[in-house]
Structures are given as structure tokens and as C-alpha cells.
Image (spheres, coloured by chain):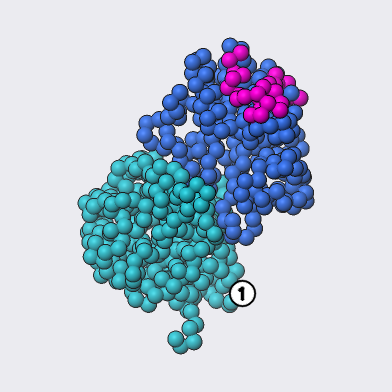
Chain colours: A blue, B cyan
């Protein structure tokens, strides 16, 4: 059950030039949350910008905190970057369908690109020991601070950067071939071309693939119907309610 | 406190307070249960229903604008059959009156929808959507030609005895002409305004921000226009006017009542504050106390224009 929570900000750490990690005390949301779910954050107390912003839950702390990872991309995230410890933040959540781990017997492979890494850390926290994490970003500066905790959580981590400054020089799906025989489930979040590439390889190897989508939404709770994306049968699915995590086979991707 | 009277009347329908939720912004109500007490509202108007399910428009469907948002959802809805079988069982458990918003492509569509819903227990009224800007046929023509609006109203009137509200489009030269036309055709009330047609462009990509190119503008940005139209319409018709447009606080609601609205609908505010409607009910009580008014109905049309 989602709830409304006025949460106190513990920290808002700048990880890179434009990436922040916000840690807030939100015990009710933290207790109810599952990996892959998201919260709606009020970024301004005024009417402009008007709408809340959706953020997947990046991690859950033992102290009733949750963290959110965000990149400054517009007015909402610019305001959020200015939030200071001690400020309160108005949150709604948790919303949406998270990752389904009921069928994961063999190790799970987490595949994240850029800010898509955000929900995967929470997932890594909740998974048993044997797990892989394939993480990619544009360069070392962006990837290094995001990748650190995955190894601490027991993931076998492999990295890739677009410019080769850290790990494999190239794209994440390149790394998947050798890992796939060892896994029963792939969970991915990131740019669409990356997720498509991952889903294509999973289908060929008959490994289940869950993808977490990102889109604009006004309400986060299935009322505005603004977050629709094409589903398989010509209808639309709603990222906030049927997602944000989908089985890749539910989406009309030409794999 | 106990003596405060927030009741208002829309035709034969008595509301415990004048705060309704606007169609298309409140889902089928159940979505909001975690965030407010639905039974404290004056009434609930659910997402517009058509005879057949509609898939809606391709994305992107929404874009934020200054103090507002544009939407081009395209009337996505589950259709009347699934509405009755899947949504009504929950809605029937609520004590707040339920008003069902209907939309169609033809007079026959509207008539049949009214017939179907007339037989369903638990429905307290019908709101006829003749004003959605986001679909190619139907809606917008019915909403912009007075004779067409009157014909839809008469068709629905002939099919149901339920209180009948007609939701008007602001995208017309003179909204009072439309209001008078549907009043003459048997509407019990008019609600206004639906969204204003607008658009947003991404200068970097040189593309429209909505896949539908144009969409309906809502939120605080439209409130002054809505207030003006409610004020003009309330002076032009003798049936109740329900004010809609950028209402997010009790103060906003009071302004609409003063302009002549008998009730209000909370719309876009539900998206950014899902408990807004209940907060407005509480705020109206505080307003009455602060102004030593016992009855909310005393505020309706009480605007002091200094004799102008």
C-alpha cells in the first residue's frame, strides 16, 4: 500500500558533476518498498514546476531510510540538487510493480546502464549471494561511484564504458555472452538500445529478462494515464501500474 | 462547528459539500484510497466511459508547462461493460455520490450509454463529455456547435432520469451560448471548463512535445480563464454551474463559488496532491468559520463587483 510521507533529508551527496544521491528518512515507504518500485517526489513547494517527479528507489537503509539516485537533467532535478540535509521532502509511494524474483533459482544477472543502475542496487541488496552485475556508463567518472557498492553486496561485477576509461571499451551486451549460461534471470534498466540488446540475447539463450522502463508521468498511481507505452497487442501498458518492471516479452520489441 | 452547512444541490442531487473530483484526473477512485477518505468528498466523477474500450493516443501523452500541463490521453478507458463489471463493485461500496462521465462518437452512443448506466445501481448522476479536445471525431464537434450540444443533451435526457451534467469546452467563441443551448435541452447543470487546446514544442529537436501535437491545458495556469467563464455562465443560465480549472486549494474553490459556481471539481491537483480534494473540504469549513458564515450556499455568486 503506498503512502504519503514527509521525510527528512539525511544527505544529498554530489557523486559527479551532475549526479546526486539523496538519502531520506522515510520509514513507512522503506518498509513497504520492493526493488524496482518508485516514489513520486515533490520538487517544489510552489506551483511551478507543478508535477512530482518519479524516482526508482536506489537502496534501502536499516535505519528506515531510502536513497534516490538522480542526474540533473531539467528544472525538477535542478531544484532537487539544492535540497539540504535537514530539509523535508514530500514523498508518495512506493508505487508500481517491481522485479519478480519468484522464479530465480540460479544466479540473477543485473544489467544497468547510466542512471538505469539506480534500481539495481536495491535489487542487489535483496538478492542472495550469487549474483552478477554488468554495469556501464559513458566514462570512469560516471561509472566508478555507482559501481562501488555492487561488489560490497557480493556481486561479480563487470564494467564497461563508452570511452574505455574503465572496464570493457564498448557496450554492456558485449559482456553478457559469457555470463548467460550461469544465470536464470536477467534484470535490466538503462537506455532502450541497451535493454533491447540485452533482451535479444536473453531470448536467444532462453533466459527470462525483466526490464525497468522510465517515462514521464503526472501522478504515478494509474490515474492520469500519461505514462502509457505500446504493449504487444496494439494496446498500451502503463509504466506506473503494470510497470515500471516488465517481462521483455510483454513489450513489442523486435528482438 | 456542527452548525456549518456545506450542502449544495445539483438538480435532484444533494451533495454533502461542493467538492467533486474531475473526470480523467481521479481514475476510478480506488487508486486514491490510500491518500484520502473518499466518503468525505461531495462526489466522485470517474474517468470518461465509452461504449467500447479505447486504447488512447500514442505517447508522449503529457508534458508539463508553466504552472500547468498538457495532456493528450485520447480518452483511454475500459469501456462500459468492464466499467460496470470491474469498477462498479468497488464504487458501490462508497457513500459519496458517484457521477459517471460518458463520451461517444454519435447521438446513439450517448443515448445507449445513458440507457446502460440508468439501470446500474449506485450511480447518482451522469456527466456528458462533449468537450474533449484530444480525439478526431465526436467530442469536439458536439462541444462547439450549440445545436449539436443540445441534441446530445436531449438524447441523454430522454434515456435517463438521473441528474444530468453537461461538461462544456472553453474552446468556443462564447461559452454562454453553449450553456444556454444545453440548459434548454434539459441539462440539470453545466460543468466548466474542460481543458484549453494548447501545444508545446521542443526547440532543440524542432518537434512537438506531444505525439498528438496538440493537447488540453490544465492546472493553475488556466484558473483565471475558468473563473471568467464560470462567472459569465452563471449569469447566463439558471441551472447550477460547476466550476473546474486549476482548483488546488480551498481558496481557489471559494473564488469559484463567489463567481457563481454551485460546486467545484478538483482536477490536475489530484496528480500532484492526491489528498487535495479532502483538504479543500476541510479548508472550506475553516473559511466559513473565519467569515462567520453558516452556509456554503451563501457564497454562491456572492462576488462583490461594486455594482458593476
- Classify A210 as above or below B68: above
Q: Depth check: give the residue in front, B293 or B201.
A: B201
- Residue B188 visible in this rendered orientation of the protein: yes
Residue at 39 percent of width and 48 percent of height: B212
Q: Is residue B134 left or right of residue A12?
A: left
Q: Position of residue B120 (x, y in %)?
A: 32, 48
- Classify B288 as above or below A159: below
Q: Which residue is mark 1?
A: B290
Q: Residue A160 colored magenta?
A: yes
Please identify the quadrant where the N terminus of chain B is shown. bottom right
Residue at 50 percent of width and 51 percent of height: B202
- Residue B2 visible in this rendered orientation of the protein: no
Q: Position of residue A171 (x, y in %)?
A: 60, 25
- Classify B63 as above or below A98: below
Q: Depth check: give the residue in front, A179 or A56.
A: A179
Determine the chain carrying the residue at label 1.
B
- Range of the magenta residues? A152-178
Q: Which residue, as the protein is rendered here, is positioned at the far top?
A: A181
Label 1: few (<14), some (14–19) or many (≥20) C-alpha neighbours in 10 Å: few
Amino acid at each position: 500500500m503506498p503512502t504519503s510521507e514527509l521525510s527528512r533529508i539525511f544527505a544529498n551527496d554530489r557523486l559527479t558533476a551532475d549526479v546526486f544521491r539523496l538519502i531520506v528518512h522515510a520509514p513507512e515507504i522503506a518498509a513497504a518498498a520492493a526493488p524496482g518500485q518508485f516514489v513520486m517526489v515533490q520538487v517544489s513547494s510552489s506551483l511551478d514546476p507543478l508535477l512530482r517527479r518519479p524516482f526508482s528507489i536506489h537502496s534501502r537503509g536499516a535505519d528506515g531510510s531510502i536513497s534516490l539516485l538522480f542526474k540533473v537533467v531539467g528544472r525538477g532535478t535542478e531544484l532537487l540538487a539544492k535540497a539540504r540535509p535537514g530539509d523535508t521532502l514530500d514523498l508518495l509511494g512506493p508505487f508500481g510493480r517491481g522485479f519478480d524474483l519468484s522464479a530465480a533459482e540460479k544466479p540473477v544477472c543485473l544489467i544497468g546502464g547510466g542512471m538505469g543502475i539506480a534500481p539495481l542496487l536495491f535489487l542487489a541488496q535483496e538478492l542472495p549471494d550469487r549474483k552478477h552485475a554488468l554495469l556501464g556508463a559513458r566514462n570512469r567518472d560516471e561509472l566508478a561511484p555507482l559501481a562501488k557498492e555492487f561488489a560490497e553486496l557480493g556481486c561479480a561485477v563487470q564494467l564497461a564504458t563508452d570511452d574505455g576509461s574503465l572496464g570493457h571499451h564498448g557496450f554492456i551486451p558485449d559482456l553478457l555472452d559469457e555470463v548467460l549460461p550461469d544465470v536464470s534471470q536477467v534484470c535490466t534498466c538503462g537506455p532502450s538500445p541497451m535493454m533491447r540488446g540485452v533482451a535479444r540475447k536473453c531470448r536467444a539463450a532462453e533466459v527470462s529478462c525483466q526490464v525497468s522502463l522510465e517515462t514521464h508521468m503526472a501522478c504515478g498511481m494509474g490515474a492520469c494515464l500519461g505514462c502509457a507505452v505500446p504493449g504487444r497487442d496494439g494496446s498500451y501498458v502503463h509504466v506506473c501500474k503494470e510497470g515500471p518492471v516488465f517481462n521483455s516479452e510483454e513489450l513489442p520489441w523486435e528482438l | 462547528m456542527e452548525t456549518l452547512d456545506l450542502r449544495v444541490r445539483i438538480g435532484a442531487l444533494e451533495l454533502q459539500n461542493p467538492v467533486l473530483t474531475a473526470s480523467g484526473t481521479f481514475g476510478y477512485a480506488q487508486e486514491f484510497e490510500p491518500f484520502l477518505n473518499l466518503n468525505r468528498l461531495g462526489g466522485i466523477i470517474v474517468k470518461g466511459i465509452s461504449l467500447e474500450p479505447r486504447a488512447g493516443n500514442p505517447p508522449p501523452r503529457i508534458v508539463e508547462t508553466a504552472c500547468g500541463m498538457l495532456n493528450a490521453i485520447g480518452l483511454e478507458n475500459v469501456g462500459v461493460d468492464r466499467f460496470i463489471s470491474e469498477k462498479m463493485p468497488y464504487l458501490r461500496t462508497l457513500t459519496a455520490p458517484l457521477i459517471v462521465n460518458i463520451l461517444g462518437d454519435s447521438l446513439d452512443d450517448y443515448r445507449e450509454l445513458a440507457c446502460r448506466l440508468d439501470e446500474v445501481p449506485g450511480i447518482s448522476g451522469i456527466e456528458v463529455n462533449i468537450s474533449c479536445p484530444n480525439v478526431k471525431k465526436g467530442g469536439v464537434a458536439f462541444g462547439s456547435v450549440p445545436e449539436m450540444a443540445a441534441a446530445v443533451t436531449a438524447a441523454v435526457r430522454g434515456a435517463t432520469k438521473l441528474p444530468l451534467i453537461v461538461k462544456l469546452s472553453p474552446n468556443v467563441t462564447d461559452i454562454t451560448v453553449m450553456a444556454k443551448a444545453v440548459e434548454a435541452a434539459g441539462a440539470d447543470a453545466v460543468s466548466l471548463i474542460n481543458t484549453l487546446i494548447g501545444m508545446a514544442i521542443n526547440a532543440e529537436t524542432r518537434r512537438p512535445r506531444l505525439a498528438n501535437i496538440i493537447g488540453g491545458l490544465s492546472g493553475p495556469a488556466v484558473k483565471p480563464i475558468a473563473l471568467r467563464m464560470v462567472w459569465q455562465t452563471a449569469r447566463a443560465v439558471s441551472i447550477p454551474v460547476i466550476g473546474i480549472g486549476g482548483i488546488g486549494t480551498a481558496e481557489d474553490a471559494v473564488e469559484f463559488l463567489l463567481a457563481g459556481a454551485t460546486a467545484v471539481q478538483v482536477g490536475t491537483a489530484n496528480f500532484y496532491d492526491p489528498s487535495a480534494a479532502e483538504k479543500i473540504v476541510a479548508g472550506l469549513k475553516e473559511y466559513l468559520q473565519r467569515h462567520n458564515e453558516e452556509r456554503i450556499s451563501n457564497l454562491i455568486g456572492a462576488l462583490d463587483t461594486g455594482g458593476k
